[in-house]
Amino acid sequence: MHSAKRLEEIAQILAAQGSVEVQELAKQFNVTGKTIRLDLDKLAKMGMVERVHGGAVLKQPHTDLFQIRSRRQTNTREKQAISQRALEYIEEDDIIIIDGGSTTQPLSRLLGDKRITLLTNDLLIAGEVLEKENVTLYVTGGRLSDHRREGVYTLLGRDAEALLQKYKVNKLFLAATSLSFKQGLMVYSEDVAAAKKAMLQAAEKVICLIDYSKFHQQAFLTFARLEEVDIIITDDRIPDHDVKYLESRGIKVDVANVTGP
C-alpha cells in the first residue's frame, strides 16, 4: 500500500476512534512500527494529531478535516460570495467542468441563465442542474466515493478519469482541500487527486474556488502546482501580502467581498 493511501486510511480511523496505537496499526497494515511512527509524525507535522506514547490522538480543532458534512456547513457566506464571482467567468456556449466540493457546489445552483455544457463527476452538482434546460449535462462514469456516508457523491477511478481525458473544455472550476504556497493544491485521497489531474489536463483555463480558511494548510497529496492555476477566487479575508505573492507567480487573484450581517 502506498504511503499516501495508508495515511488516508489512518486518518479515517482517527476520525472514527479519536486515537490510534502504533502496534495495532502496524499489524493492521502489515508494516513495521517504525513505518507507522513515521506516518504519525507526518500527521503531527500537519497539525492534525498529537503524538503520545505508543500512538497518537486526533486534535479536536482539526476533526472537521475528515468530516465533509460539517465542512459544507462552514464558511457558507464566503463560499456563496466566491460562487457569485465565479459565475461572472461563465459565458454563453461555454463548455465547463465543475469539480466536486463544498465551494463549487453553490456555483452549480446559480447556472441556468446562459446556454452551456457542463461536465462533472459529482452527483450532487449534477442534481443541481437536472431541471435547468440551458445546461447540457455530462456526468462521468466511475466508482462512487467510499465517503458517501460523509456526504460525498463523487465518481472516481479509471472510468471517470478516462472520460475526463476524452474531452477538452473552456474552463475548469476547481476545488481543493488545502492550498500551500510551498506544496500547491492538496487533497487527502489518491483517487480524488487522480480525477483532479485529469480535469486539469482537459481545461484551457483553470479557475480555483477556495475560501481563505484553506490557505496555508496541508493535506496528504499535491495534485497541482500553483502555476497550473490561472485564477484563484477567494474571499476578502485574504491579506494583501498573500495576494501579491500569488500574483508574483503569475496567478490572478479575484477577491469576493462577503456582505451581510
Image (cartoon, rainbow, N blue to C red):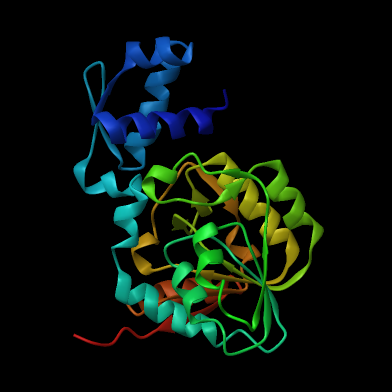
Q: Quadrant of residue 20?
A: top left
Residue 238 seen in render: no
Residue 190 seen in render: yes
Q: Quadrant of the N terminus?
A: top right
Where residue 16 appears, as percent x and y from the top left, is 29, 32
Where residue 203 appears, as percent x and y from the top left, is 72, 67
In the image, farthest residue toward the right: 166
Residue drawn at x 52%, y 80% as measured from the top left? 86
Q: Quadrant of the C terminus?
A: bottom left
Name the side, left or right, on which 44 lies relative to 202.
left
Name the side, left or right, on which 11 lies relative to 182.
left
Where residue 184 appears, as percent x and y from the top left, is 53, 56
Above/below status of 130 relative to 40: below
Where residue 151 appears, as percent x and y from the top left, is 40, 51
Q: How many marks?
A: 0
Q: For this rendering, which residue is in front, 88 or 112?
A: 112
Residue drawn at x 42%, y 63% as measured from the top left? 102
Above/below status of 186 relative to 8: below
Residue drawn at x 70%, y 81% as measured from the top left? 94
Above/below status of 11 relative to 134: above
Name the side, left or right, on which 155 lies relative to 182.
right
